[in-house]
Amino acid sequence: MAILKAFRGWRPPANLVKELASRPYDVLNSEEARQEASGNPYSLLHIIKPEIDLPEDIDHYDAAVYNKAAENFKLFRDKKWLVQDDKPSLYIYAQTMNGKTQYGIVGCAGVEDYMNNVIKKHELTRPDKEEDRMKHVRITNANMEPVFFSYPAKKEIDEIIEKFVKENKAVYDFTADDGFGHHFWVIDQEEIINRLVQLFEQLPATYVADGHHRTAAAALVGNEKKEQNPKHTGKEEYNFFLAVHFPDNQLTIIDYNRVVKDLNGLSKEEFLARLEKGFEVVKKGKELYKPSRLHEFSMYLDGEWYALTAKRHTYDDNDPIGVLDVTILTQEVLSPILDIQDLRRSNRIDFVGGIRGLGELSKRVDSGEMAVAFALYPVSMKQLINIADSGNIMPPKTTWFEPKLRSGLVVHSLED
């Protein structure tokens, strides 16, 4: 059974929401955040990337950075830029991209569910990134940003959400600068809340779609507080953390592509010859070429696009990991031919979210920065769930979800 809990969220007034809501902390670097928040004192970036309010040369892990986060969070509350709801509530957060809208339930997930693997993961986390977000949670005593979860779609949940949205006006409704729509409703009726909580109790599991480091940090801090409290009851707010839960049948994963700096000393002709061991290689010319099915890749090399179709011996459709195109590319190209053995640490490879388009791949190769680019067919939600259910871990940089959740629509305090 999965935990879903109502809480008294801290939210911006409607007239400030568009200025306050920001992209997640990990999708832009400090310089980009500094530019994005320039001239905007309301941006949540002042809390989630507080180094932007300190000297540019400061170490981003300096204690002063975390202290600034706590100071700015207090400032936002003091100035009523964030105001706490009177009643425990659940929330509906809908996002619109390219004419399609997906509806998520905002509520608290349970630390206990994370520890007991009711919340299932599909990526490894890095201890240094976990600790960074843990420090942020500790010092603000809050989950400033939600994590992005999915759950097996359930008809009655869909019907409750659809009915509520139809009968109630959104408290927030705006289009961000990237053109994506964001819509938000408050559910404070106990009868509806209780039924949604009951329906979540019937779910066998929920799944981390995006935000593995934030999820781990939130859960680990909650567990710390439990161990430090001799009067722990299990009902304290630190036992729960902020998540947006989307039904799996509404989500789309987009491609997550690769660019590599060099051909590992091979000539173009030698590289293409090596590829033929694992792929049918067909030249497609100068026009952008996008993979159209699983086990087909597109490659950009020396001003031209190629279709690479994996040969049957390179994959195992009965293996949750062996079926993945990221596995095929790593095992057949990146590791044996290009000698990239650790995707997490190699400085010869970079990853490009599909939201940037294939033109970004050709641009980086044509500039001379990179030598070759690979575009992949996107992973499916079914593949993600199969991997998480089997206890396996996806290779690094496999999934890219879009649109990203906007941070700041609601904040969860661990104090109340």
Image (tube, rainbow, N blue to C red):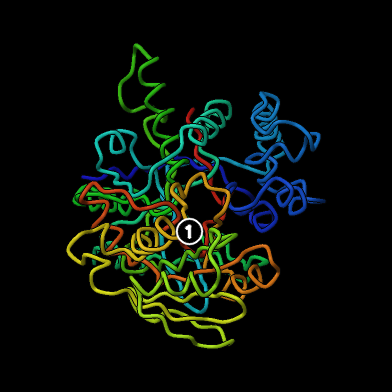
Q: Is residue 222 above or below residue 91?
A: above
Residue nearer the viewer, 330 or 224: 330
Residue beneath the point at 70% across and 55% down: 19
For the N terminus, the image quarter is top left
Residue 374 appears at what percent x and percent y?
49, 69
Q: Secondary structure at mark 1?
A: loop
Residue 388 appears at what percent x and percent y?
27, 51
Tally of numbered tags: 1
Residue nearer the viewer, 72 or 357: 357
Tell me which amino acid carries mark 1.
Leu
Q: For the residue carrying disc 1, how many other residues have a C-alpha within 10 Å: few (<14), some (14-19), or many (20+)?
A: some
Residue 292 vs residue 352: left or right?
left
Q: For the view shown, which residue lies furthest in the top direction?
A: 230
Residue 70 appears at what percent x and percent y?
64, 29
Residue 110 vs residue 299: left or right?
left
Residue 264 vs residue 216: left or right?
right
Say which residue label 1 marks. 338
Residue nearer the viewer, 100 or 283: 283
Residue nearer the viewer, 246 or 18: 246
Residue 352 visible in the shown view: no
Q: Is residue 54 above or below residue 15?
A: above
